[in-house]
Every structure is written in C-alpha cells, then in structure tokens.
Image (cartoon, rainbow, N blue to C red):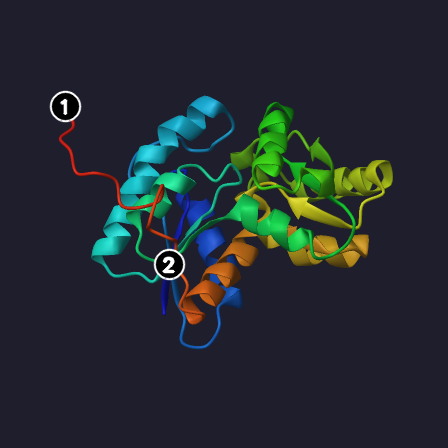
Amino acid sequence: MRILVVNPNTTASMTALIGECARAVAGPGVTVDAVQPGSGPESIESHYDEAMAVPGVLDEIAAGELAAYDGYVIACFGDPGLLAARELAAGPVVGIAEAAMRTAAYLGRGFSVVTTLSRTIGHTWDIARQYGVADLCAGVHACEIPVVELETDPEAYATVLGACRGALERDASDSIVLGCAGMADLCARLSHELGVPVVDGVVAATLEVEKLVRLGLRTGKRGELAPPPAKSFA
C-alpha cells in the first residue's frame, strides 16, 4: 500500500516533519511519501492562503494518481481542496481536520481545538459544523503562534501547552485536537503532560486512509464526487 501525504504549503521542513509523523504510525507493508506543491503560500493562515494553495494540492493529487498511490492525506487543518481531491482520486482522500475531530468524538463528550492564530477560529467552527461534530466541540482556542514559527520559536511548545491547559479548564473538555499539521510532533508529549488524549490529525488521517484501503473502500463516484467533466480551461 502506498499513501501520499500532501502538505498544502511550500515549507519543506514542515513537509519533512509531517512525513516523519505519518510514517511512524503506518502499518506493515505501507509506504508513506510526503510532498508539497512547487508553488503557493509558505503557510496557510487565511482564506486567501487556502484558496491559493488549492491548485498546488490538486496538482499533487493528479501526479499521485499517475504514480498509482492508493490513498491520500491532505495535511492542513483547513482541509483545502478536499472535495475536489476526492473527485480526482480513485482511492480515499482524508483531511486532517475531519480525521482529528471524528477521532476525538470517540474519546469523550467534548473536545477542544487548539490552533495557531485567532483569525482561524471562525473557520475551524465552520469545519466542525460541516463535519457534523460542532455539538462535540467545546471550544476553539488560539496560541497566537504563526505556523512557520512553530519550528523556530523556542517558546512554542510551552505556549501550546499553556493554551491546551487553558482550553481544558475553560471548556471542561475530555480531549484536545491540535489545529495545525505543524504541531504533529508535539502530540505525545502534550498528552503525557496534560493527562488527556491529544489528537493529531496527520496521524489520525494516515491511519484512516490505511484503514479504508485495507477495507477496500473508496469515495463513491455515482454523483457529486464522480470525476469532473472533461473540459478546456482558458
């Protein structure tokens, strides 16, 4: 089985981190490759960034189809281009936000999301409503660290940890969902220190794709998510 993890931004160091975390949980006989688009935003922190990232995501999905990958992960918490990717791909495509939130729904009566910047909070609520888990989302909280600074700020871990503690206290939630792929490597340490389940969407989505492929399941193609009609583009 071959899974392609697509980092929608163009920061190579984040792609390497995401790939390492995904490969760490892949089962026997599963190969995980991680890629990023050749052009697009270095991080995704706005609706504009997300829109500009989608063409690159779809280019990587199309290339993955030519290379015969079995399934795909979209490794950005906004799940940019997810439905269009499902139209293009023969195998399953899973976004990390959907995977993380649905996983957290198994773990208690409510979860809190800890994300990067406060300007993404509204969009996170939109995603929770779209996936039907808004009633289980007890709150969305920002640590106010830009995505690319998660790797470079020496205080990043302490800041994220503090935001998680505050979220648990304010929301009385049972688990934490990390709202950025760039937080993937913090998951185990946070869970240990907080004493609650902490869900990283990169790992959750990778395992979800692996499960779907092993079950022989893929996106239904009878209606909306059938391959897009062939047409010329000016």
* For residue 118, side relative to residue 14 (left or right): right
**Residue 33 visible in the displayed image:** yes
On the image, which quarter does residue 234 sit in?
A: top left
Residue at figure coordinates x 30%, y 56% from the top left = 90
The residue closer to the viewer here, 127 or 201, is: 127
Q: Position of residue 171 (x, y in %)?
A: 82, 38
Which x, y percent locates residue 69? 30, 61
Amino acid type indicated by mark 1: Ala
In the picture, the quarter occupied by the N terminus is: bottom left
Asked which secondary structure carries label 1, the reply is loop
Mark 1 vs mark 2, CA separation in Å: 30 Å
Q: Position of residue 28 (x, y in %)?
A: 45, 77
How busy is the neighbourhood of tag 2: few (under 14 within 10 Å), some, or many (20 plus)? Answer: many
* Residue wearing tag 2: 71
Give the residue type that dot 2 points to.
Answer: Gly
Mark 1, other Cα within 10 Å: few <14 / some 14–19 / many ≥20: few
* Marks 1 and 2 in Cβ contact (< 8 Å): no
- Residue 50 position in % (x across, y down): 43, 30
Q: Is residue 73 above or below residue 212?
A: above
Q: Is residue 182 above or below residue 211?
A: above
Of helix, strand and loop, which one carries label 2? strand
Q: Residue furthest bottom?
A: 28
Residue that mark 1 sits on: 234
Judged left or right of residue 222, residue 175 is right
**Closer to the N terminus: mark 1 or mark 2?**
2
Compare residues 119 and 226 and report the one nearer the observer.
226
Q: Residue furthest front?
A: 222
Quadrant in the picture for residue 7: top left
Q: Measuring 37% from the left and 58% from the top, which residue is drawn there? A: 71
**Is residue 37 at all visible to an observer of this figure?**
no
Q: Residue at (16%, 28%) from the top-left corner? A: 233
